[in-house]
Amino acid sequence: MIARIRAWALGVGQAAADWMEVRTGVVSMLEHFLYEPVPKRGMWLYTLGSATLFLIVLQFLTGILLLFYYVPTTDEAWNSIYYIMTEAYFGLLIRGIHFWSANVLIVVVGLHMLRTFFSGAYKAPRELNWVVGVVLILLVTVLAFTGYALRWDAEGFWAWEVGIKIGSYTPFVGSYVATFLLGGDTVGPATLSRVFAIHVWLLPALLAPLIGIHLYLLRKHGEFGSEFEYTKRLAELRERKQIEEYALYEEGDESPRE
Amino acid sequence: MAELQKDPVTRAQFIVMGTVGTLVGAVLTIPPVAFMLSPTIKTNFLGQSDVPDDWHELGSVFEVPSGTPKLYRVEFPQNQTYNGEDPLLGKGTIMNAVLVSWMDGEIPSALENASQGGLSASQIEELTSQLNVMSNHCAHLGCPVRWFPDRDEFLCPCHGGIYDINGGLIGGPPPQGLYYYAFEIREDGGIYVKHEFTNGEPWVV
């Protein structure tokens, strides 16, 4: 009985997948998206990119949810977060996920970068993807930093002040950077509005297409680094040498070189 | 390449297209960029400030002790975004912590001979030259400094900036001493400050 139900469910699932595949090509698209050959040695380290992507998606989703309650004004910002934490259903969970996954994201993205570096996956023809990755890590760092300030509590406020002060040391344009980030020459409501705009709109708008480019380049050149390529190159070299030797043998030289 | 070009662009067409392209590009980019950068343009190029150019009373010179600084808080009115001068927008304020001390911690002789009733012009001049009116924001990254009486120094909790009682830099990463407010002493001994700094811009405050 169970076997029959299982067979029936499998058949229905297969039919549904086929129906979708014929009309949208989504199944083959997913297959292409989800599967990527990686070297056997240290293969788990190659999941760090997917983990980063998962955490970023989590940030987007929980961030959108937090926007339903967060009020970006100097008077209400902290209160609205307090409300989320204490009054809104599952607010503690949603904000907790946003906060902790942001922290974990920084660690995972750093490990992902280290893995890419040590596996030599930044080498030709993947240099551009490395550059895109570096820009992405900078964007994620600024996102984390601006998120810090949105709480508008003492810790976030002082962290943002330190950030503005660091920005003010930029050679030649320091004062312009400071006034741009402050929204004037003092900290105030415009400062929080700017932090909010940068955190919620500007940086995600830059991040999303860059992630798309990062994934496109990954698909184009593959994820694995030099080690895998080296093995492939060696195999190709052996094959070529073998063909050359056979060619010599066929030409009459009966003692092919080792 | 040249022979593949079916419709060669004439010089006149090139100039027209270039001019129109530049104009369209300017129309599309200048408004959003100027919109985003308007605080920078107003502050850095037009010299405007969020805080009106008024004097605010801090306290009296007779309150400033010898050997230790006195901390004042002053609430400056602030016109920024929602806190404009229009009555519909309401008024905002920004609180500043101001450290006031005598030069090397020593009360000037002019003050010892003065009465609270009135100060002469020469006494005001001497007191002004002997008074330090400083921001409590560290000149490194802006953290609030505190006075440690057992060391006779201001210390910054963030990265260890050290300043003397005059706000002069003793050690640590700050590139300069504490920021000095523009101030004046009036005949009754009142100390008045403006939201203006005479040796750099601390930002944020």
Image (cartoon, coloured by chain):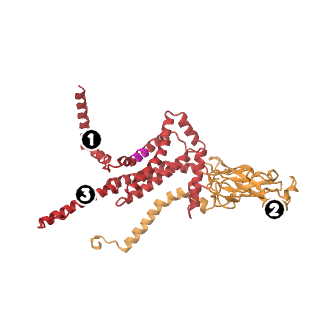
Q: Mark 1 belongs to which amino acid? A: Met
Q: Is residue A116 visible?
A: yes
The earlier-in-sequence mark between 3 and 1 is 1
Secondary element at tag 3: helix
Q: Residue at x 54, y 50 (%)?
A: A195
Q: Check residue A52 for magenta coloring.
A: yes
Q: Quadrant of residue B177?
A: bottom right
Q: Is residue A30 above or below residue B122?
A: above
Instruction: Find out whether the residues at labels 3 and 1 contact each other: C-beta distance under 8 Å.
Output: no
Q: Colour of chain B?
A: orange
Q: CA distance from mark 1 to mark 2?
A: 87 Å
In screen coordinates, is B78 left or right of A99? right
Q: x, y (%) of residue B186?
A: 80, 56
Q: Quadrant of residue B199?
A: bottom right
Q: Residue at x 13, y 67 (%)?
A: A253
Please give the letter of the chain rendered in red.
A
In screen coordinates, is B27 left or right of B92? left
Instruction: Say which of marks 3 and 1 sits in front.
Output: 3
* Residue B125, numbered circle: 2
- In depth, the one of A74 and A257 nearer the eye is A257
Determine if marks 3 and 1 fall on one subunit. yes
* Residue A235, numbered circle: 3
Determine if marks 1 and 2 fall on one subunit. no
* Residue A20, numbered circle: 1
Question: Which residues make up the magenta segment?
Answer: A50-56
